[in-house]
Image: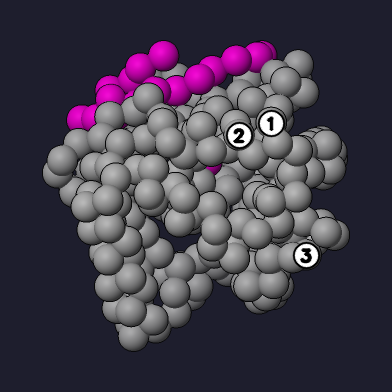
Amino acid sequence: MMYQLNGVSYYVHIEGKGEPLLLLHGFTGSSQTWRTFMKKFVKDYQVIAVDIIGHGQSAAPKEIKPYSMEAVVEALHELLQQLSLSQVNVIGYSMGGRLALSFAQRYPHLVKKLVLESASPGLKTREEQKLRKEKDEQLASRIMKNGIEEFVNFWEDIPLFSSQKQLPSHVQEAVRKERLSHTEIGLSNSLKGMGTGVQPSLWEKLDDLLMPVLLITGEVDQKFCLISKEMQTLIPNATSKIILGTGHAIHVEQPEIFGRIVSEFLATT
């Protein structure tokens, strides 16, 4: 179903009954990335899977402003208001994890529990941010110049997703199809508007998060394992899980294990 949020058309898939569970996908993903996960959770939860701006069936405006992290956080806030929800559990993967963190930091009273899968609070220094911003802008230009297919071919081969080469062919094909479904302007503006380089750092605000937080990373994804380990020391009520033999996208690579860990975390009082 389409919702007008902060002046932008967002596609939101809502299914199931029970406690609300907001799902936020990663860059080049969509609400479809959660389809296996949702099958189990719709029995006990009202699952709310959002296509983030520039992705899936949501709008991909030419203007950059609606893509900023602040603007997307406000869009999520508006969604909860339209759905008359006073509190939700939130799961965010990668880019969606950065969004989930930003939302929880801005509206902590609205987040009951927070699950961060392969997520980061941004970059610590201005220099790191500057370099990453330049890199993201170069990638955004490449997408606009060479098109989606060339970009997806490149994106599939970056080290971050190397473990996905071991997945069954039908899973790899579904991931590729999802990536190819996007527009050049949507992905390009997403990078420029809410990429890691332009996102405000949340490292110094992690101790403000008082809700229960679950940090999930894959053993093969060493970079995010280290980030998660440091985050755990700074978030007062955080637990961490490292999934053996798994890379960046645990919910895709090990859906059963991911589902079980999340289910146990959400069920605890």
Q: Mark 3 points at which residue?
A: 219
* Position in image of residue 12 (x %, y %): 45, 23
- The numbered mark, 2 or 3, whose residue comes first in the sequence reads 2
Residue 210 as seen in the image, left or right of residue 26 = right
Residue 256, can we see it?
Answer: yes
Q: In which quarter of the image is the C terminus?
A: top right
Residue 223 among those drawn in magenta: no
Q: Name the residue under label 1.
A: 170
State which mark lies toward you, 2 or 3: 2
Report x, y in % for residue 102: 44, 54
Q: Which residue lies furthest to the left in this view?
A: 63
Mark carried by residue 173 = 2
* Magenta span of residues: 1-25
Q: Distance between the residues labelled 1 and 3?
A: 23 Å
Is 8 one of the magenta-colored residues? yes
Q: Distance between the residues labelled 1 and 2?
A: 5 Å
Whether residue 154 sits left or right of residue 46 in the image: it is left
